[in-house]
Amino acid sequence: MKSEPQDIEFVTLGSFSPRDAEKLLERFEEAAISFRLRERKPDPQPGPTAGVDISVESARAADAARIHAELFGDGLPNYESSFFRDHHNV
């Protein structure tokens, strides 16, 4: 991933399996969408990656959501996604 300016704001897209994250990140790179990721390891660490938390640049969040929908359907992987800050499932 190319480095991005420090002033870019990021929003959480969600948590993904390593395989799904790879598909998404490839498409984000093609679309020039800046992203950050954090690998999650199972307890106890070390071990294989259990999941990947992905954030995308806030200015391109709609584009990232569209790419996600093209790959996996229209539902994001968790209800805490910052794309839906004002809408909480109870």
Image: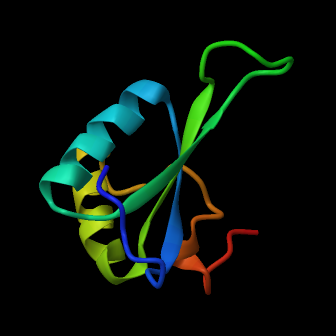
**Which residue corresponds to the image point at 40% horizontal and 37% vertical from the top-left?**
21
Name the residue at the left extreme: 30
For residue 74, above or below residue 16: below
Q: How is the image coloured?
A: rainbow
Residue 89 in percent (x, y) is at: 68, 69
Name the residue at the top extreme: 47
Q: Is residue 70 visible to the viewer in this orientation of the structure?
A: no
**Which residue corresponds to the image point at 80% horizontal and 19% vertical from the top-left?**
45
Query: In the shown orientation, is residue 59 left or right of residue 10?
Result: left
Query: In the shown orientation, is residue 39 left or right of residue 72?
Result: right
Q: Is residue 17 visible to the viewer in this orientation of the structure?
A: yes
Query: In the shown orientation, is residue 35 left or right of residue 79?
Result: left
Q: How many marks?
A: 0
Which one is nearer the viewer's eye here, 46 or 12? 46
Which one is nearer the viewer's eye here, 18 or 70? 18
For residue 4, above or below residue 54: below
State which quadrant residue 51 falls in: top right
- Quadrant in which the C terminus is drawn: bottom right
Residue 81 in percent (x, y) is at: 57, 65
Which one is nearer the viewer's eye here, 71 or 59? 59
Residue 60 in percent (x, y) is at: 30, 76
**Which residue corresponds to the image point at 30% horizontal and 64% vertical from the top-left?**
64
Query: In the shown orientation, is residue 72 left or right of residue 58?
Result: left
Name the residue at the right extreme: 44
Residue 5 in percent (x, y) is at: 39, 76
For residue 88, above or below residue 72: below
